[in-house]
Amino acid sequence: MRDLVERTRAAGRLVGLVPTMGFFHEGHLELMRRARTECGVVVVTLFVNPTQFGPSEDYDAYPRDFERDSALAEAVGVDYLFSLEAEEMYPEGFQTTVSVKELSEVMCGEDRPGHFDGVATVVAKLFNIIPAHRAYFGQKDAQQLLVIRRMARDLNFPIEIIAVPTVREDGLAMSSRNSYLSPEERLAATVLYRSLEAAASLIESGENSTGVIREEMEQVISTEPLVNLEYVTICDNIYLQPLSELSGEVLLALAARVGRARLIDNMVFDVE
Ligand code: AMP
């Protein structure tokens, strides 16, 4: 894989990388399309990474359909779909971890200890296996995006990280885990986006207090008994430090449990 990418680079072509865990939906396909328009060669990786799942999480149940995925990737013009087994990624004796300390401990890191170490380590490995010019990640996973940006900068990976806006369906951010939702739960889950929209209109009307905005979001979400809110946070969009007043680039992020699924969503605002 690395030889192939190096030869492609030597031929003067721009290489784009899209890391995924498969079971493609429009969110994944949007990343691939964006890479397709910007790069000469597009490599998509498909690897359900065991080290980013906690012991009681859904690694075994995580949806998989390689045939469907490869047909979808081919249809959007992906050049290479790179997939491998956990034993190949982590052969016997493997013991190195990449840990982006503080960014990994807050928000989703509180409920999922070790998750972002798993992500940072596998993405570092993928950046080495596929030395692309650009790598595409979804804004939907805002904390993951910041962890990867930090990791790439701290470890001097010569790769440009591109964020792609969240793709939604009836407001709900698309996710492979949406397949766990019953029709009632899926409908209820749209309240997450409505809470972000409510926050957006408060911000537009000049509200500056994060306490007021967070309360409004929690209130909107509490109208849906099927949705169990885990956290709402309002923080800066680099270090994830909570803010009391809006200023600069601000991230509003949340996580909630709906049935079997743990869902996340966010919006970013630029506040003068
Ligand atoms: P996953 O397969 O869930 O690990 O996701 C692979 C990539 O697709 C990650 O960079 C995600 O942030 C991105 N992604 C997942 N869902 C969406 C979405 N609804 N919109 C945009 N990007 C997404």
Image: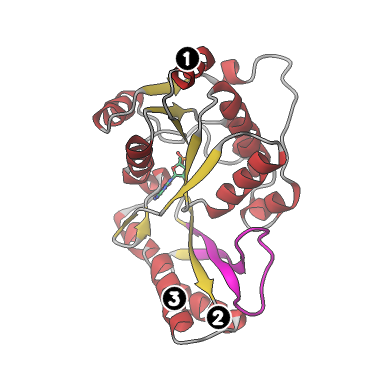
- Looking at the rendering, the stretch of residues picked out in magenta corresponds to 228-257
Q: Closer to us: mark 2 or mark 1?
A: 1
Marks 1/3 in contact by CB < 8 Å: the verdict is no
In primary-sequence order, the first of circles 2 and 3 is 3
Estimate the spatial distance between the alpha carbons at disc 2 and disc 3, rounded to whole Å: 13 Å
Q: Which residue is mark 1?
A: 7
Q: Is residue 208 above or below residue 67?
A: below
Q: Looking at the picture, which amino acid does disc 1 mark?
A: Arg
| One can see residue 161 in this view | yes
Query: What secondary structure is found at the residue carrying circle 3?
Result: helix
Residue in the picture at 44% in, 70% down: 196
Image quadrant of ligand 1 equals top left
Q: Check disc 3 and report the residue beneath it.
A: 200
* Quadrant holding the C terminus: bottom right
Instruction: Give the spatial CA distance, label 2 vs label 1.
Output: 54 Å
Residue bearing the label numbered 2: 215
Q: Quadrant of residue 172?
A: bottom left
Q: Amino acid at mark 2?
A: Glu
